[in-house]
Image (tube, grey):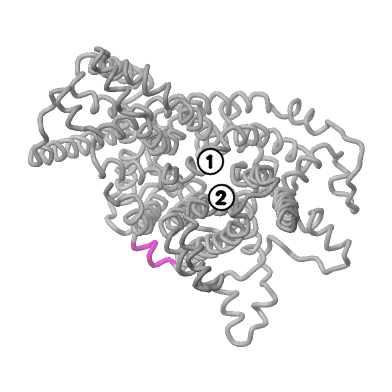
């Protein structure tokens, strides 16, 4: 891209680092101040529909004027709508969340004075053994599902990385699960695994096999019968049929995603190294280990990142399969239950901040090697 | 000859696996035409007398037409806002690298945000503004994940538009805005269409925000309405399947439309 040409054309001055830093500083300060003002205005209810409509129309008019008159700075004019919208819908809620989490606010005390409690909500959460088990469940869910999806998807991709008839039909079919509405998928599997009239139960009855109590807390017999550690595993690591059902549902829905991305990566790996390896007499495993994996490292990281982020977001499937039962409560379910169902806003907010930190740590770990490599 | 046979076999095998994989969806589709008794009957039958009773029930006893309208309007508006604002920003990012890496990273991180984190502040803020249980609140809420998606994916599509054409237009005296609308947007049209369809699918499928922010009849969306068939005492399978099919049909059609762009869209433009 010929940036110098554009700069010459638009007469934009060369960028000076100290000036840019000052600008960033000023804009960050102004965002924080305006956010605090907005939070206050929510508290004292200064805002209503009319005020918002007037502000929005004013902003739109201002933006159009900028569009016409600020031709030289058009690149900033172009990102204004997105920036403003993203500030309103992510930064302000986040500051509001922080504000909530250091007070003790419930639905009943919301309109009264908010009691400042400092970090007590966070400490309560950290000391709550239940929350620890939810955290374990969430981590376990993410690791098991993403791991399984990766292995199955990789297997499919390696198998299908060639041309054959019917490839496009198979692909179109594989696309369907991952684009389907998660809540419908969850309800569908709730029906299939249902103990009274489910499809799986019917098949088992036909084959005269014992009925499997899916979707219940019945421990997996295989794990339970392991001497010594079996009961402990069931107790602490959720080796029960409910968790298994959840994993089946998620793996069914998201394996095609892994498969598609990995296949796209595989088909972009050049053929020559494989030919050379063949001449040298490499085995299938050696080819996979020393050619395929290094070539696909980036794509594997992307696939894992996106899947881990989605697995951390999961709510719909669990809601469909188990409702808000205590059986399968991930961190997201906990936020929903505390903050919305029980109207315990502050505890939910503190938990949300924890989840946010948790997610950003994990995503940073992946984002650096993928998106931050300078072009 | 032998190789050809192997290819055919592989093709049949793959299509078979794919069919088994999507069998649950097919089964739900079939079951939605079964009568209520047949769904919970002891034996599995493939051939039966189809009935439309569940669809009739869904549209007469439950206000599903209203939910359908709600869903459609929310999807259309959130898609329009996200694609409009997002393409502008994506163009700026692609051409001028505005804001550098930090800005792109901020957008990416807002895409990574779990919706459950935003639910509590959204609920309280919108309730205080008095716009809960309306279309507006869902449109705003869905923009959180759609907007960042559009920026990230469209950036890649705009980078593929050759700069030379735009330069030629600029030299001919076009303003930046008209270059954008008359040159870049038409050239990136496949990307814009794909992005819109993706946004529509994501918003159509969204559940958590809809569950928390709009539970009244006036603004309830289809996924929440489908979830309502599951109660603590009994599950009404028949209408549930009918609702599921109504929700899934547009998604499947849209998916087939964007098939070509899918690996690109779903990896946020990381994969071309």
Query: Looking at the image, which residue is at 64% across and 83% down?
Result: A226
Q: Is disc 1 surrounded by few (<14), some (14 to 19) or many (20+) residues within 10 Å?
A: many
Q: Is disc 2 surrounded by few (<14), some (14 to 19) or many (20+) residues within 10 Å?
A: many
Task: From the viewer's perspective, tell me whether residue B178 is left or right of residue B99.
Answer: right
Return the chain for callout 1.
B
The spot of residue B137 in percent (x, y) is 46, 30
Whether residue A351 is visible, yes or no, is: yes
Disc number for residue A260 = 2
Q: Which residues are magenta?
A: A123-128
Measure the alpha-carbon separation of dots 2 and 1: 9 Å
Q: Give the tally of numbered discs.
A: 2
* Residue at which label 1 appears: B262
Task: From the viewer's perspective, tell me whether residue B140 is left or right of residue A185.
Answer: left
Where on the picture, by quarter, is residue A94?
top left
Query: Looking at the image, which residue is at 42% across and 60% down?
Result: A297
Q: For the residue labelled by badge 2, is the local secondary structure a helix, a strand or a loop? A: helix
Whether residue A324 is visible, yes or no, is: no
């Amino acid at each position: 891209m010929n940036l110098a040409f554009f700069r010459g054309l638009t007469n934009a001055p060369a960028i000076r680092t100290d000036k840019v830093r000052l600008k960033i500083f000023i804009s960050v300060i102004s965002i924080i101040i305006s956010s605090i003002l907005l939070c206050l205005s929510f508290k004292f209810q200064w805002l209503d529909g009319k005020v918002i409509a007037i502000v929005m129309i004013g902003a739109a008019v201002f933006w159009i004027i900028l569009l016409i008159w600020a031709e030289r700075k058009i690149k900033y004019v172009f990102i204004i709508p997105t920036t403003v919208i993203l500030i309103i819908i992510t930064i302000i809620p986040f500051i509001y969340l922080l504000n909530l989490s250091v007070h003790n606010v419930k639905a009943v005390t919301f309109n009264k004075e908010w009691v400042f409690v400092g970090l007590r909500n966070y400490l309560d959460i950290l000391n709550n053994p239940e929350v620890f088990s939810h955290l374990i469940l969430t981590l376990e869910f993410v690791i098991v599902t993403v791991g399984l999806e990766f292995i199955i998807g990789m297997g499919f991709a390696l198998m299908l990385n060639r041309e054959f008839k019917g490839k496009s039909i198979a692909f179109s079919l594989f696309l369907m699960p991952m684009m389907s509405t998660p809540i419908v998928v969850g309800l569908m599997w709730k029906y299939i695994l249902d103990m009274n009239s489910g499809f799986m139960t019917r098949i088992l009855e036909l084959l005269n096999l014992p009925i499997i109590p899916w979707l219940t807390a019945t421990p997996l017999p295989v794990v339970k019968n392991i001497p010594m550690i079996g009961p402990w595993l069931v107790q602490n690591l959720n080796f029960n049929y409910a968790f298994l059902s959840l994993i089946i549902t998620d793996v069914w829905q998201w394996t095609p995603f892994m498969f598609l991305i990995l296949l796209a990566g595989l088909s972009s790996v050049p053929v020559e190294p494989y030919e050379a390896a063949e001449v040298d007499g490499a085995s299938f495993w050696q080819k996979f280990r020393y050619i395929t994996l290094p070539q696909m490292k980036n794509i594997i990281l992307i696939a894992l990142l996106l899947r881990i982020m989605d697995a951390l977001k999961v709510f719909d499937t669990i809601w469909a399969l188990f409702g808000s039962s205590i059986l399968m409560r991930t961190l997201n379910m906990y936020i929903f239950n505390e903050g919305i169902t029980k109207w315990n806003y502050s505890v939910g907010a503190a938990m949300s901040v924890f989840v946010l930190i948790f997610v950003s740590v994990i995503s940073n770990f992946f984002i650096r090697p993928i998106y931050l490599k300078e072009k | 000859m032998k190789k050809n046979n192997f290819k055919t076999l592989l093709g049949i095998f793959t299509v078979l696996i794919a069919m088994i994989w999507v069998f649950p969806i097919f089964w739900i589709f079939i079951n939605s035409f079964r009568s209520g008794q047949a769904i919970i009957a002891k034996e599995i039958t493939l051939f039966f007398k189809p009935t439309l009773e569940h669809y009739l029930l869904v549209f007469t006893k439950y206000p599903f037409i209203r939910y359908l309208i709600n869903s459609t309007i929310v999807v259309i508006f959130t898609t329009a806002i996200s694609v409009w604002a997002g393409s502008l920003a994506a163009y700026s990012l692609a051409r001028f690298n505005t804001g550098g890496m930090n800005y792109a990273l901020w957008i990416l991180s807002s895409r990574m945000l779990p919706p459950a984190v935003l639910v509590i502040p959204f609920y309280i803020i919108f309730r205080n503004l008095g716009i809960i249980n309306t279309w507006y609140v869902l449109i705003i809420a869905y923009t959180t994940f759609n907007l960042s998606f559009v920026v990230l994916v469209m950036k890649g599509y705009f980078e593929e538009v050759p700069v030379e054409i735009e330069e030629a237009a600029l030299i001919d005296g076009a303003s930046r805005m008209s270059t954008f609308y008359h040159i870049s947007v038409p050239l990136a049209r496949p990307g814009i269409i794909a992005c819109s369809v993706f946004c529509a699918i994501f918003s159509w499928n969204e559940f958590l925000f809809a569950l928390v922010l709009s539970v009244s009849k006036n603004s309830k969306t289809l996924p929440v309405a489908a979830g309502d068939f599951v109660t603590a005492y009994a599950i009404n399978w028949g209408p549930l399947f009918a609702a599921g099919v109504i929700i899934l049909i547009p998604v499947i059609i849209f998916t087939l439309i964007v098939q070509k762009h899918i690996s690109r869209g779903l990896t946020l433009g990381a994969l071309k």
